[in-house]
Amino acid sequence: EAQVTQNPRYLITVTGKKLTVTCSQNMNHEYMSWYRQDPGLGLRQIYYSMNVEVTDKGDVPEGYKVSRKEKRNFPLILESPSPNQTSLYFCASSLKGDTMNYEQYFGPGTRLTVT
Amino acid sequence: KNEVEQSPQNLTAQEGEFITINCSYSVGISALHWLQQHPGGGIVSLFMLSSGKKKHGRLIATINIQEKHSSLHITASHPRDSAVYICAVRWSGGGADGLTFGKGTHLIIQP
């Protein structure tokens, strides 16, 4: 089954404790992206990757890191999480990213709480 | 800053009604997406448009490039259509290669 998976689905952590949210897709998609969703603000892009070893900042990259060592995986790293990073996170992928004229496939979301 | 505006923010209707959700954007785009977010949180892609009109079942999406406006219509609405509908665009003028999202329209269809 074609899908984007994220782990963990729910996470409660404390300020400053490094964490990684994994994202994997099995569709051989070139483009992958991370978004956060907050009440009243909607979805906002954190980082995206046009292909392996190619990543770039989105609209709200502060406090996050990503890597794209393999085509299928795009982990989101919070080196020192803070309470303002409490949010619902989505990973997404599409076949290519150069025109965005391709369907976006979203993961199930990761609900992160930082205390 | 380039923006995507959706209206209405909230919409409650009776089963069977014809539903229209609107999306306006500020500058030129290369693509517009309509997404559906279920009460459980999952997001699915409904349509991707760069011009004209698309139809899938009871859902119809249209876009007017000159007026910078898109609409999502639901015919013969059903309670299972209750969800948040999100419009997203890719700007054509450069900048970060990603999507900018509207804040969503929360739709409730009552039986």
Image (tube, rainbow, N blue to C red):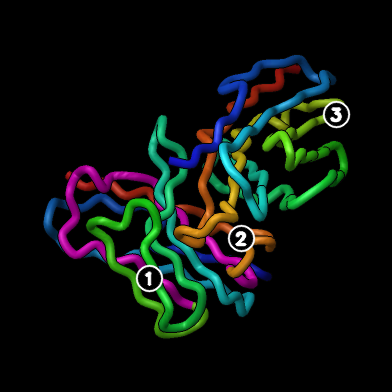
For the residue marked with disc 3, what is the amino acid? Thr
**How far is disc 3 from disc 2 in space, using C-alphas?**
25 Å
Q: Which residue is mark 2?
A: A105
Q: Earlier in the sequence, mark 2 or mark 1?
A: 1
**Residue identifier under label 3:** B75
Q: Residue at x 61, y 60 (%)?
A: A105
Q: Which is more toward the observer, A114 or A67?
A: A67
Mark number displayed over residue A27: none
Q: Locate residue A57 relative to residue B16 in the image: left or right.
A: left
Numbered mark located on residue A75 in the image: 1
In this picture, residue B14 sits left or right of residue A71: right
Label 1: element kind: loop
Contact (CB < 8 A) between labels 3 and 2?
no
Going by the numbered disc 1, the residue's amino acid type is Pro
Nearer-the-camera pick, A70 or B98: B98
Secondary structure found at label 3? loop
Q: Which quarter of the figure has residue B63?
A: top right
In the image, A101 versus A34, the foreground residue is A101
Could you classify mark 3 by the number of other residues whose Cα lies within 10 Å: few (under 14), some (14-19), or many (20 or more)?
some
B4 w.r.t. A2: above or below:
above
Locate residue A102, reporting x and y percent. Answer: 68, 63
In the rendered image, the quadrant that contains the C terminus of chain A is: top left
Chain containing the residue with disc 3 = B
SS state under label 2: strand
> Residue A2: percent from the left, percent from the top?
66, 69
Q: Chain of mark 1?
A: A
Q: Amino acid at mark 2?
A: Tyr
